[in-house]
Image: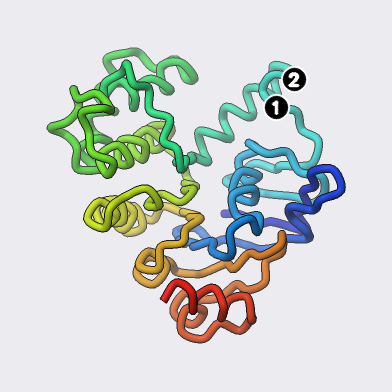
Amino acid sequence: MIRIRALCKRHGDHRVLSGVSATVERGELIAIVGPSGGGKTTLLRCLNYLEDFDEGEIDIAGFALRPGRPGLRGANAAGRRMLRELRAAVGMVFQQLHLFAHLTALENVALAPQLVRGVPRAAAHDRARELLAQVGLAERAAAYPHQLSGGQQQRVAIARALAGDPTVLLFDEPTSALDPELRDEAMEVMRDLAARGMTMLVVTHEMQLVAKLASRVWIVDQGTLVEDGPAAEVVAAPQSQVGRDYFARLR
Protein backbone atom coordinates (compact mmCIF):
# COMPACT_ATOMS: atom_id res chain seq x y z
CA MET A 1 0.00 0.00 0.00
CA ILE A 2 2.87 2.41 0.84
CA ARG A 3 6.54 2.40 -0.10
CA ILE A 4 8.85 5.19 1.10
CA ARG A 5 12.38 5.36 -0.31
CA ALA A 6 15.18 7.59 1.03
CA LEU A 7 12.80 10.43 1.96
CA CYS A 8 14.51 13.72 2.85
CA LYS A 9 12.96 17.03 3.87
CA ARG A 10 14.85 20.22 4.71
CA HIS A 11 13.93 23.61 6.13
CA GLY A 12 16.90 25.69 5.03
CA ASP A 13 19.98 23.96 6.41
CA HIS A 14 17.97 21.93 8.91
CA ARG A 15 17.13 18.34 7.92
CA VAL A 16 13.67 17.50 9.19
CA LEU A 17 13.68 14.04 7.57
CA SER A 18 16.83 12.21 6.54
CA GLY A 19 16.79 9.07 4.40
CA VAL A 20 13.54 7.55 5.70
CA SER A 21 12.66 4.24 3.99
CA ALA A 22 9.77 1.95 4.95
CA THR A 23 6.85 -0.07 3.59
CA VAL A 24 3.28 -0.54 4.79
CA GLU A 25 1.08 -3.48 3.79
CA ARG A 26 -2.66 -3.17 3.20
CA GLY A 27 -4.64 -3.27 6.45
CA GLU A 28 -1.74 -2.47 8.80
CA LEU A 29 -2.02 0.09 11.59
CA ILE A 30 1.36 1.77 12.05
CA ALA A 31 1.97 3.75 15.25
CA ILE A 32 4.56 6.47 14.65
CA VAL A 33 6.17 7.40 17.95
CA GLY A 34 9.26 9.13 19.28
CA PRO A 35 10.44 12.30 21.00
CA SER A 36 8.65 15.54 20.18
CA GLY A 37 10.19 17.49 17.31
CA GLY A 38 11.65 14.38 15.71
CA GLY A 39 9.84 14.67 12.38
CA LYS A 40 6.79 12.42 12.91
CA THR A 41 4.12 14.88 11.78
CA THR A 42 6.24 16.08 8.85
CA LEU A 43 6.59 12.47 7.70
CA LEU A 44 2.84 12.01 7.93
CA ARG A 45 2.13 15.21 5.98
CA CYS A 46 4.53 14.19 3.20
CA LEU A 47 2.42 11.08 2.60
CA ASN A 48 -0.42 13.05 1.05
CA TYR A 49 1.71 15.94 -0.16
CA LEU A 50 0.60 18.49 2.40
CA GLU A 51 4.39 18.92 2.72
CA ASP A 52 6.70 18.94 -0.28
CA PHE A 53 9.98 17.04 0.15
CA ASP A 54 13.47 17.46 -1.27
CA GLU A 55 14.65 13.94 -2.06
CA GLY A 56 13.27 10.42 -2.24
CA GLU A 57 10.09 8.77 -3.44
CA ILE A 58 6.69 7.89 -2.01
CA ASP A 59 4.31 5.43 -3.65
CA ILE A 60 0.99 5.38 -1.82
CA ALA A 61 -2.46 4.04 -2.71
CA GLY A 62 -1.52 3.94 -6.39
CA PHE A 63 -0.03 7.47 -6.50
CA ALA A 64 3.64 8.24 -7.17
CA LEU A 65 4.86 11.28 -5.21
CA ARG A 66 8.18 12.85 -6.18
CA PRO A 67 10.09 15.97 -5.09
CA GLY A 68 9.11 19.35 -6.40
CA ARG A 69 5.48 18.72 -7.23
CA PRO A 70 3.65 22.05 -6.72
CA GLY A 71 0.78 22.52 -4.34
CA LEU A 72 -2.79 23.19 -5.39
CA ARG A 73 -2.22 26.88 -6.05
CA GLY A 74 0.83 26.45 -8.26
CA ALA A 75 -0.23 23.30 -10.08
CA ASN A 76 -1.75 23.08 -13.53
CA ALA A 77 -5.22 21.58 -13.95
CA ALA A 78 -3.88 18.01 -14.16
CA GLY A 79 -1.76 18.52 -11.05
CA ARG A 80 -4.65 19.97 -9.08
CA ARG A 81 -6.86 17.07 -10.10
CA MET A 82 -4.19 14.56 -9.06
CA LEU A 83 -3.79 16.19 -5.64
CA ARG A 84 -7.55 16.17 -5.05
CA GLU A 85 -7.69 12.50 -5.99
CA LEU A 86 -4.67 11.74 -3.78
CA ARG A 87 -6.20 13.45 -0.75
CA ALA A 88 -9.45 11.58 -1.23
CA ALA A 89 -7.56 8.27 -1.34
CA VAL A 90 -5.24 9.25 1.54
CA GLY A 91 -7.47 10.89 4.15
CA MET A 92 -6.13 12.80 7.13
CA VAL A 93 -7.49 13.51 10.60
CA PHE A 94 -5.67 16.50 12.04
CA GLN A 95 -4.69 17.17 15.64
CA GLN A 96 -6.66 20.41 15.42
CA LEU A 97 -9.90 19.06 13.98
CA HIS A 98 -10.82 22.11 11.85
CA LEU A 99 -14.55 21.37 11.88
CA PHE A 100 -16.63 24.21 10.43
CA ALA A 101 -18.38 25.80 13.41
CA HIS A 102 -21.34 27.04 11.36
CA LEU A 103 -22.12 23.59 9.92
CA THR A 104 -23.79 20.63 11.59
CA ALA A 105 -22.00 17.31 11.96
CA LEU A 106 -23.89 16.05 8.91
CA GLU A 107 -22.95 19.11 6.84
CA ASN A 108 -19.29 18.91 7.88
CA VAL A 109 -19.10 15.31 6.64
CA ALA A 110 -21.07 15.93 3.44
CA LEU A 111 -19.34 19.13 2.34
CA ALA A 112 -16.16 17.84 0.64
CA PRO A 113 -17.85 15.21 -1.57
CA GLN A 114 -20.17 17.94 -2.89
CA LEU A 115 -17.43 20.51 -3.50
CA VAL A 116 -14.59 18.25 -4.64
CA ARG A 117 -16.37 15.44 -6.47
CA GLY A 118 -19.65 17.08 -7.39
CA VAL A 119 -21.75 14.54 -5.49
CA PRO A 120 -25.40 15.71 -5.38
CA ARG A 121 -26.47 17.14 -2.03
CA ALA A 122 -29.02 14.41 -1.27
CA ALA A 123 -26.55 11.62 -2.02
CA ALA A 124 -23.79 13.31 -0.01
CA HIS A 125 -26.12 13.69 2.97
CA ASP A 126 -27.23 10.06 2.74
CA ARG A 127 -23.59 8.93 2.74
CA ALA A 128 -22.78 11.30 5.62
CA ARG A 129 -25.58 9.74 7.69
CA GLU A 130 -24.12 6.28 7.02
CA LEU A 131 -20.67 7.42 8.12
CA LEU A 132 -21.93 9.14 11.26
CA ALA A 133 -23.75 5.92 12.14
CA GLN A 134 -20.52 4.00 11.54
CA VAL A 135 -18.70 6.14 14.13
CA GLY A 136 -21.61 5.99 16.58
CA LEU A 137 -23.06 9.45 16.02
CA ALA A 138 -26.26 8.80 14.06
CA GLU A 139 -28.32 10.67 16.65
CA ARG A 140 -26.01 13.73 16.61
CA ALA A 141 -26.17 14.48 12.88
CA ALA A 142 -27.95 17.82 13.44
CA ALA A 143 -25.61 18.99 16.23
CA TYR A 144 -23.10 21.79 15.71
CA PRO A 145 -19.47 21.30 16.83
CA HIS A 146 -19.93 23.40 19.99
CA GLN A 147 -22.74 21.05 21.03
CA LEU A 148 -20.46 17.99 20.82
CA SER A 149 -17.90 16.65 23.27
CA GLY A 150 -14.26 16.46 22.24
CA GLY A 151 -14.59 12.76 21.56
CA GLN A 152 -17.68 13.30 19.43
CA GLN A 153 -15.93 16.04 17.46
CA GLN A 154 -13.04 13.65 16.86
CA ARG A 155 -15.46 11.04 15.52
CA VAL A 156 -17.05 13.62 13.19
CA ALA A 157 -13.55 14.40 11.88
CA ILE A 158 -12.97 10.69 11.25
CA ALA A 159 -16.32 10.41 9.44
CA ARG A 160 -15.37 13.44 7.34
CA ALA A 161 -12.08 11.78 6.36
CA LEU A 162 -13.98 8.61 5.45
CA ALA A 163 -16.32 10.57 3.17
CA GLY A 164 -13.65 10.51 0.46
CA ASP A 165 -13.68 6.69 0.52
CA PRO A 166 -9.96 6.57 1.34
CA THR A 167 -7.77 3.50 1.17
CA VAL A 168 -5.31 5.00 3.69
CA LEU A 169 -6.06 7.14 6.76
CA LEU A 170 -3.47 9.34 8.47
CA PHE A 171 -4.00 10.48 12.07
CA ASP A 172 -1.95 13.22 13.75
CA GLU A 173 -2.15 12.65 17.52
CA PRO A 174 -5.88 11.84 17.46
CA THR A 175 -6.23 11.37 21.23
CA SER A 176 -3.86 14.04 22.56
CA ALA A 177 -6.57 16.55 23.56
CA LEU A 178 -9.07 14.03 24.92
CA ASP A 179 -9.89 12.89 28.44
CA PRO A 180 -9.28 9.17 29.12
CA GLU A 181 -12.93 8.18 28.57
CA LEU A 182 -13.09 10.12 25.31
CA ARG A 183 -9.77 8.59 24.22
CA ASP A 184 -11.40 5.20 24.54
CA GLU A 185 -14.24 6.34 22.26
CA ALA A 186 -11.82 7.46 19.53
CA MET A 187 -9.77 4.28 19.87
CA GLU A 188 -12.90 2.16 19.54
CA VAL A 189 -13.64 3.79 16.18
CA MET A 190 -10.07 3.12 15.07
CA ARG A 191 -10.37 -0.50 16.24
CA ASP A 192 -13.51 -0.86 14.11
CA LEU A 193 -11.73 0.65 11.08
CA ALA A 194 -8.83 -1.76 11.58
CA ALA A 195 -11.27 -4.68 11.68
CA ARG A 196 -12.66 -3.46 8.34
CA GLY A 197 -9.16 -3.58 6.82
CA MET A 198 -8.37 0.14 6.69
CA THR A 199 -4.67 0.97 6.35
CA MET A 200 -3.78 3.57 9.00
CA LEU A 201 -0.73 5.50 10.15
CA VAL A 202 -1.06 7.22 13.52
CA VAL A 203 1.32 9.74 15.09
CA THR A 204 0.73 9.25 18.80
CA HIS A 205 2.11 9.37 22.33
CA GLU A 206 -0.76 7.24 23.63
CA MET A 207 0.65 4.02 25.07
CA GLN A 208 -2.71 2.24 25.02
CA LEU A 209 -3.14 2.90 21.34
CA VAL A 210 0.36 1.64 20.57
CA ALA A 211 0.02 -1.49 22.71
CA LYS A 212 -3.57 -2.43 21.86
CA LEU A 213 -4.19 -1.31 18.28
CA ALA A 214 -0.92 -1.05 16.36
CA SER A 215 0.36 -3.90 14.24
CA ARG A 216 3.77 -2.24 13.89
CA VAL A 217 5.65 0.65 15.48
CA TRP A 218 7.96 3.15 13.83
CA ILE A 219 10.22 5.09 16.19
CA VAL A 220 11.25 8.40 14.58
CA ASP A 221 13.91 10.65 16.07
CA GLN A 222 15.91 13.54 14.60
CA GLY A 223 14.41 12.90 11.19
CA THR A 224 15.39 9.24 10.95
CA LEU A 225 13.47 5.99 11.32
CA VAL A 226 15.48 4.43 14.13
CA GLU A 227 13.28 1.36 14.70
CA ASP A 228 10.54 -0.51 12.83
CA GLY A 229 9.02 -3.71 14.15
CA PRO A 230 5.97 -5.58 15.45
CA ALA A 231 4.23 -3.51 18.12
CA ALA A 232 4.40 -6.14 20.86
CA GLU A 233 8.15 -6.62 20.35
CA VAL A 234 9.06 -2.95 20.10
CA VAL A 235 7.01 -2.00 23.19
CA ALA A 236 8.35 -4.90 25.27
CA ALA A 237 12.00 -4.69 24.22
CA PRO A 238 13.02 -1.69 22.08
CA GLN A 239 16.30 -2.29 20.29
CA SER A 240 17.35 1.38 20.16
CA GLN A 241 18.37 3.60 23.05
CA VAL A 242 15.91 6.21 21.77
CA GLY A 243 13.14 3.61 22.00
CA ARG A 244 14.13 2.47 25.48
CA ASP A 245 14.22 6.04 26.77
CA TYR A 246 10.96 6.95 25.05
CA PHE A 247 8.89 4.04 26.35
CA ALA A 248 10.41 4.37 29.82
CA ARG A 249 9.02 7.91 29.98
CA LEU A 250 5.58 6.77 28.80
CA ARG A 251 5.40 4.06 31.41
Residue in front for this viewpoint, 210 or 66: 210
Mark 1 neighbour class, 10 Å CA radius: few under 14, some 14 to 19, many 20 or more: some
Where does label 2 land, which residue?
74
Q: Which amino acid does the dot numbered 2 rest on?
A: Gly
* SS assignment at label 2: loop
Give me the residue at 33% from left, 37% from top. Answer: 159
Q: Is residue 189 above or below residue 120?
A: below
In the picture, measured across the screen, residue 60 lies left or right of residue 133, that is right
Which residue is nearer to you in this view: 65 or 237?
A: 237
User: Relative to residue 8, is residue 141 depicted above or below?
Assistant: above
Residue labelled with disc 1? 71
Q: Quadrant of the N terminus?
A: bottom right
The quadrant holding residue 103 is top left
Query: Which residue does the image show at 74% across and 52% down from the upper left?
Result: 16
Give the residue type at disc 1: Gly
Q: Is residue 184 left or right of residue 96?
A: left
